[in-house]
Amino acid sequence: MRRKLAAGNWKMNGTLTRVTEVMALCAAHQAPSVDVLICPPATLIPALATATTDHAVAIGGQDCHAAVSGAHTGDISAHMLADAGATHVIIGHSERRADRGETSADVHAKALAAHTATLTAVICIGETLAQREAGETLDVVGTQLRDSTPDSATGENTVIAYEPVWAIGTGKVPTLEQIGEVHAALRIALTNRFGADANAFRILYGGSVKASNAAEIFAVPDVDGALVGGASLTAEDFSPIITALENA
Ligand code: 13P
């Protein structure tokens, strides 16, 4: 059985005052039956990693450079994230693919760096609205999955997050059938590549997940949790999503 994962991506939000939100989350979920992960801005990783040491909330980065160190002003390596207390790192989020022109080859290199640093890579894939309307969704996510995921991937060191670009921060969510179709296709693609080991990979859904829609999304086969943006910023919003996943 795959252990489910409720992951929060804070994006470029949060200062030190938000440590109290994570402490409230820890207090509300002392022994959760699912994994819980918060990916704050890199500035908060040391403080949150320290604050959550004795709690069941893991801390992750939102991106890493593919190199271990070097002349890359402003970048942070996977090794540095691990050193700061992170156990996971989000790779290839659509905002980075769009804003920074990251390709699946870049994501592949970053995932390798994450694995070398013993971080779990949360590899994001997803189609744009134009691609969905053109009927290209399964092709697009299949290609992104293939090209972004290194051969070193296992269910331990890699999580796949399906995030339709048009559902991120928009309040629009695919139908449950659409989510199920993509997750089933991703599971088949993983099985074709990794054999029986594919069963160990968690496949998260992301895009406008909230307390009000979490339970129905978590009931879709092959949805092993969520990557949550806006609704992960406060304990009040994220806690019911964790509970919905525990009850799924
Ligand atoms: P929202 O939950 O705010 O739509 O963001 C989803 C996301 O991009 C998580 O990585």
Image (cartoon, helix red, strand yellow):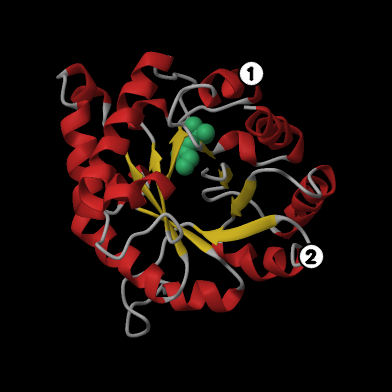
Q: Amino acid at mark 2?
A: Asp
Q: Is residue 188 left or right of residue 7?
A: left
Residue at image x 55%, y 65%? 87
Q: Amino acid at mark 1?
A: Ser
In the depicted structure, whether residue 231 falls above or below residue 10 = above
Which quadrant of the rendered structure holds the C terminus?
A: top right
Q: Position of residue 64 (x, y in %)?
A: 40, 66
Q: Mark on residue 54?
A: 2
Residue under numbered circle 1? 212
Q: Position of residue 236 (x, y in %)?
A: 76, 34
146 or 84, which is in the foreground? Answer: 146
181 or 9, which is in the foreground? Answer: 181
**Residue found farthest to the right:** 27
In the depicted structure, whether residue 208 falls above or below residue 204 = above
In the depicted structure, whether residue 42 falls above or below residue 93 = below
Residue at image x 82%, y 47%? 24
- Of the numbered discs 2 and 1, the one sitting upstream in the chain is 2
Q: Mark on residue 106?
A: none
Q: Position of residue 100 (x, y in %)?
A: 29, 54
Residue at image x 54%, y 39%? 229
193 or 49, which is in the foreground? Answer: 193
Q: Position of residue 238 (x, y in %)?
A: 68, 36
SS of the residue at dot 2?
loop
In the depicted structure, whether residue 183 falls above or below residue 42 = above
When asked about the image quadrant of residue 157, the answer is bottom left
Residue at image x 20%, y 17%? 133
Q: Is residue 246 left or right of residue 74?
A: right
Is the CB atom of the residue marked by disc 2 within 8 angstroms of ligand 1's nearest atom? no
Q: Nearer the viewer, mark 2 or mark 1?
A: 2
Q: Is residue 241 visible?
A: yes
